[in-house]
Amino acid sequence: MKTDVTIVGAGLAGLIASIQLSHIGYNVVCIDYEGEKGKKNDLRSTALLLPSINLLKAFGVWEQIKINACPMQSMRIRDLSDEKNITEVKFHAQEIAEEEFGYNVQNQTLYNNLVTFLKQSKNITVIHNDKFMNVRTRTNATFTELKSGLRIQSKLLIGADGRNSSVREKLEINTKTKTYNQHALAFKVKHEKSHENISTEIYKSGGPFTIVPLAEPKQSAIIWMDNTSKIHNIAKLDSTQFNSAITIRSGNCLGALSRISELTSWPVISQITKNTVKERCVLIAEAAHVLPPIGAQGLNMSIQDIRALANIIEGEEDPGSMELLRKYEKTRIRDSKLRTKLIHGLNLSSISNKFHAQKARSMAIQLIASSPKLRSFLIEKGLG
Ligand SMILES: Cc1cc2nc3c(=O)[nH]c(=O)nc-3n(C[C@H](O)[C@H](O)[C@H](O)COP(=O)(O)OP(=O)(O)OC[C@H]3O[C@@H](n4cnc5c(N)ncnc54)[C@H](O)[C@@H]3O)c2cc1C
């Protein structure tokens, strides 16, 4: 089989990369070892920031996704570590002359819409239930070998195969990984009060408790990060105890919370590769960088990877040339390293139960709350 670009991984990043590269004229083959319905167990939602939405708009896929998405018009950060002196800062999209910072979409909705759209694209072939095994690179092409025995010749191979990337392993690209003895629980809740399109991050100790609004005004997605053994114990609570624990941890900001979905649990890590390119091969998305789920950076950063790569290879006869791939790496690696460091630092500060660290966090929130200039700067940096 012969194509322009082979993409390993049909997760959200691999699907978006396939659509983007076909959009600029390349023939794409995308491979995943799971079946097409393989994302059914992904109960998370993704807060898509404006640059990501602009990309989906350019494909013509956004209007359909938007029907089931919730605009995030304000973002609120609360510190509950000193219950007598709760600090809060609120950011409004109007401060940067926008209606919203982005939209929150359930991953399943995003996935289903991307798959439907992709099926209508003539120059994308998706191969499910087959596994990437190896890649051999020659001067003019890569040869990707699958478990079934199929061999795909292409000018460029993209590894979008997630945090435990086999493409990365075969390319012998090393990672720098930090673990935190921390897990994130993801689930959906309904609540007494309306969320008013506000996304809220609540700090205490152990990690943030994040409430992201869903399309239904009295429903939100929750990410609760804390020490691994605590998260395991919380996950074992019966539903009455669990609902009481989440209402308390939310500081009661939306009234009583009740869980309305299964629970999924994710180990929290921070991981970045030393390089992202090798001859005719490039790593993108979680194959290249994994961040703790704070500040909606993960998939949004991956979409930046995809945009940057597309801008560099568009209209080129040989999209896998080393000159172009080095240019891509130079464009992305600094931003990825910076964001990984920043989110790592934020996560460490969210874990601490030490008085001085909590006091410093609370003072930082007060400072941001009182400075419109600092707020605008942070909003613009956060939106990427
Ligand atoms: C709790 C939580 C909340 C999050 N919230 C947000 C958010 O609000 N905003 C945001 O921007 N990001 C968020 N993220 C990050 C975001 O979810 C991830 O960045 C994104 O889902 C990862 O996508 P991916 O396509 O890179 O990897 P994956 O989803 O892991 O996809 C990789 C694919 O590769 C396939 N694969 C792997 N190995 C092989 C192989 N050898 N052969 C063939 N196929 C293979 C897998 O089957 C899989 O389908 C969150 C993450 C977590 C944990």
Image (cartoon, rainbow, N blue to C red):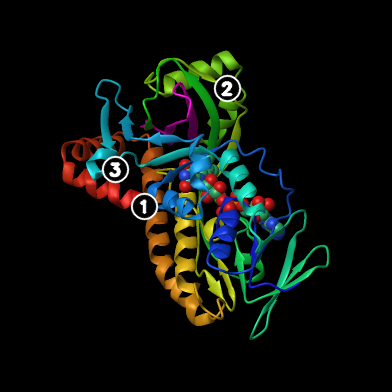
Q: Is mark 2 on a helix, strand or loop?
A: loop
| Quarter the N terminus occupies | bottom right
Amino acid type, mark 2: Ile
Q: For the magenta stretch, what is the residue range? A: 201-226
Q: Is 352 within the magenta?
A: no
The residue where tag 2 is placed is 260
Circle 1 or circle 2, nearest the eye: 2
Q: Which of marks 1 and 3 is in front?
A: 3
Q: CA separation, marks 3 and 2?
A: 32 Å
> Residue 21's x, y, as percent?
56, 64
In the rendered structure, the answer to whether residue 253 lies left or right of residue 226 reads left
Q: Which residue is drawn at 54% across and 27% down?
A: 188
Q: Which residue lies furthest to the right in this view?
A: 149
Residue 221 in magenta? yes
Name the element at disc 1: helix
Observer able to see residue 110: yes
Q: Is mark 1 within 8 Å of ligand 1?
A: no
Callout 1 environment at 10 Å: few (<14), some (14 to 19), or many (20+)?
A: few
Q: Name the residue under label 3.
A: 98
Which residue does the image show at 38% across and 65% down from the upper left?
334
- The residue carrying pointer 2 sits among few (fewer than 14), some (14 to 19) or many (20 or more) residues within 10 Å by Cα, namely few
Residue at the spot 47% in from the left edge and 77% down from the top edge: 326
- Which x, y percent locates residue 38? 70, 44
Q: Tell me which numbered mark, 3 or 2, is placed earlier along the sequence.
A: 3
What amino acid is at disc 3? Glu
Q: How far apart are marks 1 and 3 (CA)?
A: 25 Å
Residue located 48% across and 36% down the image: 69
Side (left or right) of 119 relative to 213: right
What separation in Å lies between label 1 and label 2 (alpha carbons)? 33 Å
Q: Mark 1 points at which residue?
A: 342
User: Taking 138 as reference, is 291 left or right?
Assistant: left
Query: Amino acid type of disc 1?
Result: Leu
